Amino acid sequence: MRIGIDASRAVTAQRTGTEAYAYFLIQALIPLAAQAGHQLTLYFNQPPPNDLFADNTAVTTPLSTSVSQTIIPFPRLWTHIRLAAELHLRPPDVFFTPAHVLPAPYFGRSVATVHDLAYHHFPKAYTTRQRAYLRWSTRHNARRSHIILADSNATKQDLTHFYHIDPAKIEVVYPGIDPMLHPVENQEMLTAVLHKYHITPPYLLYLGTLQPRKNLIRLIRAHAAAKVPHQLVLAGKPGWLSQPILEAAGTQSSVLSPQSSVLLPGFIADDDKAALISGATAVLYPSLYEGFGFPVLEAQACGVPVLCADSSSLPEIGGEGALYVDPLNTDNISDGIRQITDDIQLRNKLISAGSANVQQFAWEKTAVQLLTILENAAQQI
């Protein structure tokens, strides 16, 4: 079977949720497809690094025998013009896009992942053009895809609610997490990473893009009200409408003691993430809406207690390994911060439950489910 995959997101240097999903899922799928005798064609909009998947220790079959790369450089409308043309000229048996959008003119067998419908819940966080495109592309996926993947039951429910998609057409397939994430106990490594980002322990960590739906202004205020002797580290690159968040962080830092200030170290390199998480007293993720929520599992994988919102997909993903708060209630978030920093028994309980919970999320498992779905889609009429 010939499987075509839009791999354009996998080459992004600073990977956030969608890019990490594409990279790790393709990486895990390569050996499985080879073992099953399938041929993968990866479509890129720019030349990928030669070592893009070189750290995949699971790859035992040379990539040249099971994977081909098609590089289609084109600056604009790549998906709907150049990729669509390539699929028309040399159609695979089934096409998979890990990033929401199928080529508009493509009518072949296809599977598409829809990560979330945040634009329905928080329309003001998107431009008018972005909202229009996302609504169109989701309807297009619903109509053209043979099977839709959803990262969580929460996203599946949104798809059926907003677009009236037949639930039988939607498969919930949980993503995995970076296999390199684990507790870091080497003190020299921890010290080096914290020094690199100018962080002084103790600290509380948020990890993700700085944008309105992450609820960071409320988190900044809750941290100030909690009066704990911990820096609040908001680690991530600024996103759309991030300026009020940056201003709130600066305002709070000016009135708090240095050890309780708000720090903005920017994007965290993948190689530093495990140490940064491991050194934190807790990870805080009171996001207003998530289709999945990688930082919750990343904290659990590193043996760090996590506080997160009791809404959208987060209780589904975090299981019993998280302290849940009302993301709309600043006092509740503040109380949660005090609990997770002061209550040793609670912290140990969350760490233990989180370690057990995260075991069910692995990219190899995701890839096995995806390959079965692709095989089924290829056989549909």
Image (cartoon, helix red, strand yellow):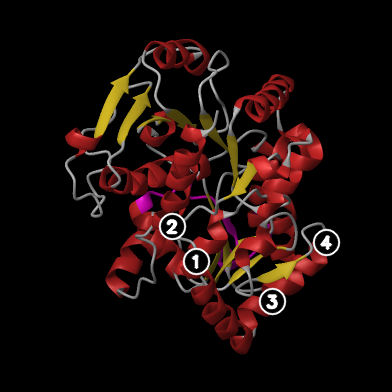
Quarter of the figure with the C terminus: top right
Tell me the magenta residue range.
254-270
Task: Give percent across and percent down for residue 269.
Answer: 38, 49
Q: Which circle marks residue 215 in the picture?
A: none
Decide: is 215 above or below 66: below
- Nearest the viewer among 63 and 373 is 373
Left or right, residue 69 beside residue 331? left
* Mark 2 or mark 4: whose residue is earlier in sequence: 4
Quarter of the figure with the N terminus: top left
C-beta proximity under 8 Å, tags 2 and 1:
yes
Alpha-carbon span between mark 3 and mark 1: 29 Å
Left or right, residue 28 beside residue 329? left
Q: What type is the residue that disc 1 sits on?
A: Gln
Tell whether position 265 is magenta.
yes
Kindly state the secondary structure of the residue where label 1 is placed: helix
Q: Which circle marks residue 329 in the picture?
A: 4
Question: Is residue 283 visible in the rendered structure shown here?
Answer: yes
> At 18% across and 35% down in the image, what residue appears?
65
Please name the residue that numbered disc 1 is placed on.
Answer: 360
Question: Is residue 251 visible in the rendered structure shown here?
Answer: no
User: Few, some or many C-alpha atoms within 10 Å of disc 2 (few <14, some 14-19, many ≥20)?
Assistant: some
- Nearest the viewer among 157 and 179 is 157
Figure quadrant of residue 227: bottom right
Kindly state the secondary structure of the residue where label 2 is placed: helix
